[in-house]
Amino acid sequence: MRFCRFNGNRLGLVEGDQIIDVTPALDVIPAQRWPLPEHDLLIAHLDEVLARANAIKAGAPRLPARSVHFNAPVANPGKIVNAPINYQKHINEAVDDKGIAHGRELKGKHITDWGLFLKATSSMIGFSDEVRLRKPDRRNDHEIELAVIIGRTANKVKAADALQYVAGYSMGLDMTIRGPELQCFRKSVDTYAVLGPWIVTADEIPDPNNLNLAIWVNGEPRQNANTNDLVYNVNKLIEYATEWYTLHPGDVIFTGTPEGVGPVKPGDTMTCEIERIGRWDVKIASEFAG
Ligand code: MN
């Protein structure tokens, strides 16, 4: 199944080019008061919500997908986990282009040397929200990445079992200001974590480690690769992350970006595509954020 959060906090099923408004299915989520749990309530109750959505969808309103506003499909991720230098050809391009890594020594290194980093949850937006660039004097880059949405609490998980903990997959844009600061700072700018436009449940993607992914900027091809080139694949990333901390339902893993990263500017349109998930545009606001 494919589901989305749209037009604010409405829940949709995605079928073809239509969105079925199944918002009343959210009523199966138990009411919560402060303090909220460490997980996203929709993802933690996803099975019950989607079962209810299926039960009511026949009589539910349908809208053209082009007419709705896609919000981030995870409303309250506890963590946005990110894999740096996780495709060898991206590492190679960062060795050659000093504008990418700003003096950090990358030759012979990969993700094992750097570990994982977190983006602020406040940086997350959906595909219909515009990216608002900051720092006009800096290079602002696109990074398309397969995004993994964790469905069950995961701690010290083995790679062989890891996919059992996945709720689904989505497209991620790890927008980046290049520079010498830590990634958690440069990549946590408001609007710099784009997720969506919907989540494809894990049963529809039996092998996340063999998916084409690509991005075009204003129609010009930039990145085009396959997740089978990941240094740490999805299974290994979950094992690696949970060696160090617990993952909760709704935590998102941005799995790393392949070669072809490059700068964007206000007014650009980024067309993102990942096999078995879909193809959708993300716009960059016409002005830098004030
Ligand atoms: Mn990245």
Image (tube, helix red, strand yellow):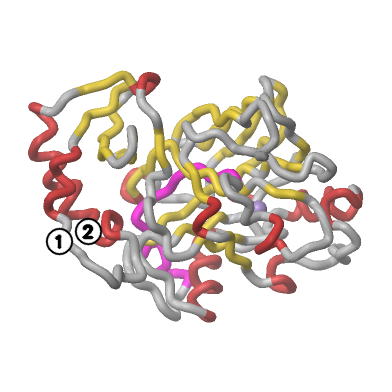
| Mark number displayed over residue 30 | 1
Which residue is rendered at x = 54% and y = 48% of the image? Answer: 146
Is 84 contained in the magenta span?
Answer: no
Q: Is residue 37 rendered to the left or right of residue 225?
A: left
Along the viewing direction, whichever of 72 and 220 lies nearer the viewer = 72
Where does label 2 land, which residue?
Answer: 45
Element type where label 2 sits in the image = loop
Q: Is residue 23 rendered to the left or right of residue 258?
A: left
Q: In this view, does 49 lie above or below 80?
A: above
Q: Where is residue 78 in the image (x, y as percent from the top left)?
A: 43, 65
Which residue is rendered at x = 55% and y = 60% of the image? Answer: 120
| Magenta-tinted stretch | 159-173
Image quarter hosting the C terminus:
top right
Q: Is residue 64 rendered to the left or right of residue 72?
A: left
Q: Which label's residue is closer to the chain start, 1 or 2?
A: 1
Residues under numbered marks 1 and 2 in contact, where contact means CB atoms less than 8 Å apart = yes
Q: Is residue 4 rendered to the left or right of residue 21?
A: right
Image quarter hosting the N terminus:
top left
Q: Where is residue 101 in the image (x, y as percent from the top left)?
A: 83, 56
